[in-house]
Amino acid sequence: MYKIGVLGAGTWGMALARMLANAGNEVRVWSALEREVEEFSKTRRHPNLPKMIIPDEIIFTKNIEDVCTDVDIILCAVPSPFVRSTIASARPFIKDGQIIVDVAKGIEANTLFTMTQVIMSEINKDGSHGNVKLVALSGPTHAEEVSLDMPTTIVSACHDMNAAELVQDIFMNTCMRVYTNVDILGVELCGAMKNIIALASGISAGLGYGDNAKAALITRGMSEITRLGLKMGCMEQTFSGLAGIGDLIVTATSMHSRNNKAGYLIGSGMTPEEAKKEVGMVVEGINALPAAMRLMRHYHVEMPLTYAINAVINEGADAGETVRKLMERGKKSEIDKSVSTLDFESSLLKSKKDTGMRRVMTYGGFDLLHYGHINLLRRAKALGDYLIVGLSTDEFRAKEKGEPCFFDYQKRKELLLSTRYVDLVIPEDSWSQKIPNIKEYHIDVLVMGDHWRGKFDYLRNYGVDVIYLPRTPEVSTTMIKEEVKQGENVPD
């Protein structure tokens, strides 16, 4: 049995509180509204979950200290606009090392923080909570179904896999299946952004459009979210999982979705304010739009659907006319790589198919190729038969290092291919591409420098050996550049 404190008595918080209590855990629920505390304690009913009976074992309180003291986990289930203020009130009573599980979905407009980042920034203000562990719990989960024990799946995401797995153990039962993920940023980004696409789906239905339009919105909407996430360093697989496409499908299609409902009302002719009033609960998609627009501009990501929904919600654009403009945009391709690049990579891989070949992959910038690089490539190739190098693009290198490479991408690629160790060079433009690369190129061994030790151990879950090789200590690209700048040890 675990002791669980729940911050927030909305539909999602209460559905989870009921599930956890029925599993034999000790559950206490806090609400900022004294009326709710009194009503729920007395009636054991929630007005927005009329079929759910609240277990007698659940204790309600208006004292936030009661749910933050002597508990195994704190479940933060308040709407995203109130997460910061709630944690500020709770902070004096939260112990260092506490596991906090967040189920709110959103992005703070002024900071562009996800909800766990908001919690971390607020809880660290006193300098006494450096070891708090934050877990995001997200996925295709409507409270209306969880409250009735209908089969549901969800993702427990945390950089600390031990914390993610503990939450998995606590929440998993015959009705709730919990998966884990280390990509907490990707999981939270999906949870916030999918609400915007659900608004679009609702508006489409309100305009009288059919299933074709809905399917297009879901598919292209997920494409937008994925493009943004990859630019932010998230893992691509997250977006094709439960927290990504799974949550988007349920939010963009279900009668339970307040975002979908609000969109439908707007498409039918209501103003956004009228729609929010009619829904009667927080419409997170509308709250997420300002942050989404800032992220789109900051990361220079093309997001036409998000842009269009913002125009309708915040700029008074006509929904029908906005759809017409979307349909008349310039021609596009679904494929990012050129046909020649795809054909080249495919022919190389097919030529080695079914030969028992062991494939090795490594990543890096390899600027000013020197004998330290050659030493790494030689040792990497010795671990297998075929070596692929993920070479940092000029844009990715500048973003991560804050300075341009001496040689541009094409020159660095040619230098690598001129060595006898490298068989194929592909562009590296995101931290999150390693999993899809491992799958696409059927990688057996991932090689990284030992200064990354432990960072990529999670990739072993995808069937690869992860090996960290020591760097050649007496040489580095940075050292060479410094010596060139200072004119030291440079031959005539």
Image (cartoon, rainbow, N blue to C red):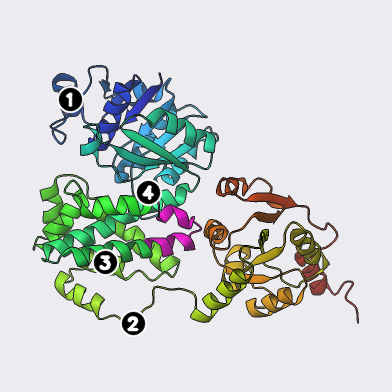
Mark 4 highlights which residue?
A: 243
Task: Say which amino acid is labelled 3.
Answer: Ala
- Quarter of the image that includes the C terminus: bottom right
Front residue of 57/378: it is 378
Compared across the picture, whether 395 is left or right of 149 comes to right
Q: Earlier in the sequence, mark 2 or mark 4?
A: 4
Name which residue type carries label 4.
Ala
Q: Residue at x 11, y 55 (%)?
A: 274
Residue 225, quarter of picture = bottom left
- Disc 1 and disc 3 in contact, CB within 8 angstroms: no
Residue 398 visible at all = no
Residue 216: numbered disc: 3
* Label 3 Cα neighbours within 10 Å, binned few <14 / some 14-19 / many ≥20: few
359 displayed left or right of 212: right
Q: In the image, residue 368 lies at what x, y percent?
A: 75, 73
| Point 39% across, 73% down: residue | 334
Residue under numbered circle 2: 331
Residue at numbered disc 1? 53
Badge 3 marks a residue whose secondary structure is helix
Q: Amino acid at mark 2?
A: Lys
Q: Is residue 291 above or below residue 85?
A: below
The image's mark for residue 247 is none
Q: Is residue 417 magenta?
A: no
Dot placed on the residue nearer the N-terminal end, 2 or 1: 1
Q: Earlier in the sequence, mark 1 or mark 4?
A: 1
Q: Earlier in the sequence, mark 4 or mark 3?
A: 3
- The front one of 219 and 93 is 219
